[in-house]
Amino acid sequence: MSSSELSILEKLSSDESITKEQYHTYQPRTNNLKKNDEIRILIQQHDQYSKPYESYLYIQGEVVLPEATTQDPTPSATLLKNAFCYLFQEARYEINGVEIDRNQDVGTTTTIKNYLSCKPNNYNNILFGWEKSGELSLYNNTKRTFYAQIPLNKLFGFAEDYRKIIVNARQELILLRSATDKNCYVESANVEINLSKVEWHMPHVELNDSSRIQFLSILKADKPLLVPFRKWELHELPALKNTSNDIWSVKTSTSLERPRYVIVCFQTDKKNNHMQDVTIFDHCNIRIMKVFLNSTSYPYDNMNLDFENNNYITAYNNFLNFLPSYYQTEYKSTTSNLTYADFKNHTFYVFDVTKQNESVKTSTIDLQIEMESTKVFPANTKAFCLILFDSIVEYTPLTGIVRKIV
């Protein structure tokens, strides 16, 4: 019998430190929501306790189909999985005017990240359009209108990892509308997508007396508060060489931006092509791929993949291992966003580089990818590399000073 079973006099306890929680709606400074427009949404209140990790971006708009023609008397458009994130090219989050996190290619970055970490059959996936392409619940195919709630934790590593309130700080969300909406749909002709509303919904909380006094003492001491999280950084190689092997020098970074996970994927003639599904990633018949951090290679042994004979179990296992490793849990889901068969048409090469020897821990780190295919790489094939690395920011609530440590 455990000691808890003997505690028959134990009273019911509950956390009453938060007395009220309400969502507040914040509008952009201007109503310019067209392509290439910058959308800035400011939260100025310094005396508020806010929870950005539970905030979300609310968007509303319509799909304008091309005029009917003899060849296409009833034009239509199939909105793709994650279509609403592809409406934005870039997203930035700032505290007191200092950039905390940035997503440089919102659509591609979130698509890759969601395939690896989104739990399947989750109702929340519907709210931001993470469903099967052409079956988005938030798109009214008759009226051709849509609305969606994109959680901030699907846009930034900061909002996913830092699950604490922000105290006495000016916050701003900056969005850059995409130059093209061709990545949002599949259609033989060009389709226009117009945004009519973009809002930032932020939960604010009120504290009970004891908690408020505690936070006031923190403000008075003006001690810097640490904000640790993991950044998502996407790199793109515009075209692979017309050979069966290639070497990609992705980046050179300081030891403070040491990669923890590296995800590589390919697309052949899909990006900015409205006749192709941009959420599909090609395997390109990769046989061997290695990630080099300086002179250290990951993995040590060759993968020896054979997609023609459906032998890609090593790559698929690395894909499945990402979720328990990244979120530090022993639980390994029996279901995944991708089955073994699906993985062949949505291929991600995942490298866990969290365990690093002393040769990697130098002043600079060269990240290089060596890849070998059983065939010549197809023309118009792009390569993407998503790097996940640790970042730490600190801010002082009283003076408003924000400083990047890592």
Image (cartoon, rainbow, N blue to C red):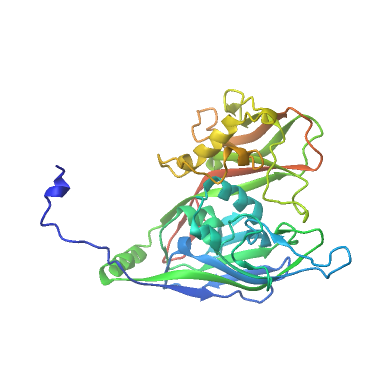
Residue 73 position by quadrant: bottom right
Is residue 363 visible from the viewing direction of this image? no
Front residue of 273 and 227 = 273
Which residue is nearer to you in this view: 384 or 395?
A: 384
- The image quadrant that residue 264 belongs to is top right
Report the residue at 55% width, 43% height from top: 257
Residue 266 is drawn in which quadrant?
A: top right
Q: Is residue 7 above or below residue 66?
A: above
> Picture coordinates of residue 389 (x, y %)?
54, 44
Q: Is residue 359 left or right of residue 30?
A: left
Please identify the quadrant where the N terminus is shown. top left
Residue 137 relative to residue 394: left or right: right
Q: Is residue 247 visible?
A: yes
Residue 232: x and y in percent read 57, 49
Q: Residue at x 61, y 38 (%)?
A: 341
Residue 57 in picture, x, y percent from top left: 56, 66
